[in-house]
Amino acid sequence: MQQIDDILGAEGPLARHLPGFLPRRAQIRMAEAVAESLAERTPLLVEAGTGTGKTFAYLVPALLAGARVLVSTGTRTLQDQLFAKDVPLVAGALGAPAKVALLKGRSNYLCTYRLKRELAQGALEGIAKREPLLARIEAWAATTTTGDLAEVPGLTEGQALWPKVTSTRENCLGQRCSDYGNCHVVAARREAQGADLVIVNHHLLLADLALKEDGFGDLLGTADAVILDEAHQLPDLATQFFGVSVSSRQVEMALAEGRASLLRAGGSLAEIGNAGRAVEAAISAVLATLAGSARPGARLRWEELSADLESAQLAVVAALRDYATTLADASREPAVAQVATRAIELASAFERITLCGDDEGARTVEFTGRGYSLGLLPFDIAARFRGLIEARPAAWIFTSATLSVPSGESDDFSHFASRLGLEQARSLRIASPFDFEQQAMLYLPASMPEPSSPAFVPAVIGASLPLLEVSGGGAFILFTSHRALAQGAAELRARWDGAAEVPILVQGEGPRERLLREFREHGNAVLLGTASFWEGVDVKGEALRLVIIEKLPFASPDDPLTKARIEYLQRRGGNAFRDYQLPEAVLALKQGVGRLIRSETDRGMIVICDPRLLGKSYGRVFRASLPPMPATQSLQEALRFLRRLR
């Protein structure tokens, strides 16, 4: 391991070539463990505290291993950063040129077939002047080499045009497509197959594991190693991928696409009219059943609804299968056959959810009044995930700042490992090298009401006001629910005199990235958010010096998925609180606290307003999970600390 020590040391190539690079013993320790795992092709779990430099700690051994490596990140933003910045920096410093490919999910790439169809539709409707954004995409399409829609200025995934010029697994024609030879998805996959290092995201990786997209090869088949950054997200994401989600809206789209594709193929709608109307009637019968037992906007457990739902839903299954047969008989055109196949897949998804057993997973129903969706999330994916990994003899390395939960005198990876079937994997915990004793303080406001009290959120804002006054803003206030967020934002705006001078940014009142950009640029703003701001947010410097956490982030026991999992664990003789609710909340709190100190020079205060941190026996597990920093319940001491920061 001397080579790793030299490379990441004070006289190594990274120190010589990268401005601001600082040798870190923690980084070297992690890199050595990763190198060992790569050499032995064994699984490894690494919790690397903020400031470890884990990205370089896995990139250095990955680039030196002479192996084909897949790196999976939590978001497309992190993918882009790795591809455009981190990998070129490390590879350049090491003098280790590597063929690197960036691969995203198919919905990120232009589908030339669907673009042509969208342009032709406009011409058919006699639209003289194209929508400016569509015209921009058309011009860009003629020159792009990647087809990555992120290259198009002003185009975002939420815009109505995006799905019209991209494909999904359901509507892609695959090798039957007339534009297959120019397909950007195929080209990106082909480039990835020939690369030494491929950068993907968890959604794409899990799609490859769980779905095996036909016609596009096995992304994982030739990988010698798979490194998963932000791995704490995997258990929940994998559960979603191994589950089922299907909606009446998908059925409506399949019916519309069936009619359109048949007309384009020169067929007659009369051939499928009765079958299509039968599907619509079956969907209407389900909606009528739901209207009698569910209020619009609710997400409920299947078991809470009318017993008639099962028979009504099975009628949808039968009607969809009949429609698929009728449509396929009406035309042999590839586009028509694709819709027929999709109708069969929708029927199978509806059937799996309708007929699943109590111990297979949690079934939910979301009813909007005009439509509905069904979901099935399996309770236990460990055996399936482990089987998929064991089928691929590669080194699997999982790393994040939050993988372990304190247990006695040690840090326990068993909760994370058991959810993915990784109990036999070697584990390593590396504490943050930051000096939290000097850089941070933990303030626990005294005399707070219980979180269940109607007075709790007003009390949180009341406890926050003197801190915000002294700090002059520069704060995150993190809530555990959208209801508490809305109440907290209204309270803060009504009660804080400083709100006139300090921008108050609230999740939902603007795109997430815009809110973060405004927060960083202003330097004294206050941002209020829920789950999406508890993790994946990196604000270095003085702009963030105060993180206020409303309460311990336990999942709501009234949430249908949480309730179903609790009942499942209890039926199996487990302790749902100890084995599921507590460790999940501990990991979430670690993420929230991790927003504050992001560099060696950051300083600031963590405020946790939940009295259970000190008043309940399980509070010690939460306290043990926090970085070592001085703690106080004295408001005056907290204010003195904040004054020193300014």
Image (cartoon, rainbow, N blue to C red):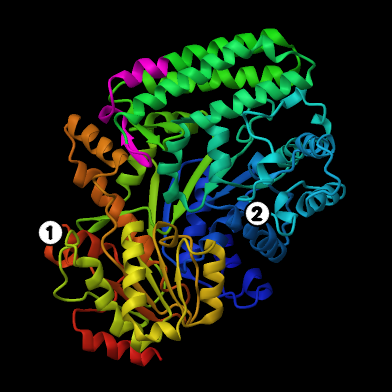
Residue 307 on the magenta span: yes
Query: Which residues fall within the magenta stretch?
Result: 295-314
Tell me what residue is drawn at x 68 percent, y 21 percent: 259
* Residue 201 sits inside the magenta stretch: no
Relative depth, front residue between 549 and 583: 549
Residue pointed to by mark 1:
617
Going 61% across and 75% down the picture, which residue do you hit?
11
Q: Of residues 629 and 425, which is closer to you in this image? A: 629
Which of 594 and 525 lies nearest the eye of the viewer?
A: 525
Location of residue 156 with respect to 322 vertically, above or below? below
Residue 41: percent from the left, percent from the top?
Answer: 52, 40
State whether residue 423 appears in this view: no
Q: Say which amino acid is labelled 2.
A: Thr
Give the left or right position of residue 116, taking residue 545 as reference. right
Residue under numbered circle 2: 156
Q: Is residue 483 left or right of residue 24?
A: left
Tags 2 and 1 in contact by the CB under 8 Å rule?
A: no
Q: Is mark 1 on a helix, strand or loop?
A: loop
Dot 1 alpha-carbon crowd within 10 angstroms: few under 14, some 14 to 19, many 20 or more: few
> Within the image, what quadrant is residue 628 found in?
bottom left
Look at label 1 and name its amino acid: Ser
Assign the C terminus to one quadrant of the image. bottom left
Q: Position of residue 509 (x, y in %)?
A: 49, 64
Q: Where is residue 489 in the image (x, y as percent from the top left)?
A: 36, 69
First reached walking from the N terminus: tag 2 or tag 1:
2
Classify 10 Å Cα crowding around label 2: few (below 14), some (14-19), many (20 and above): few
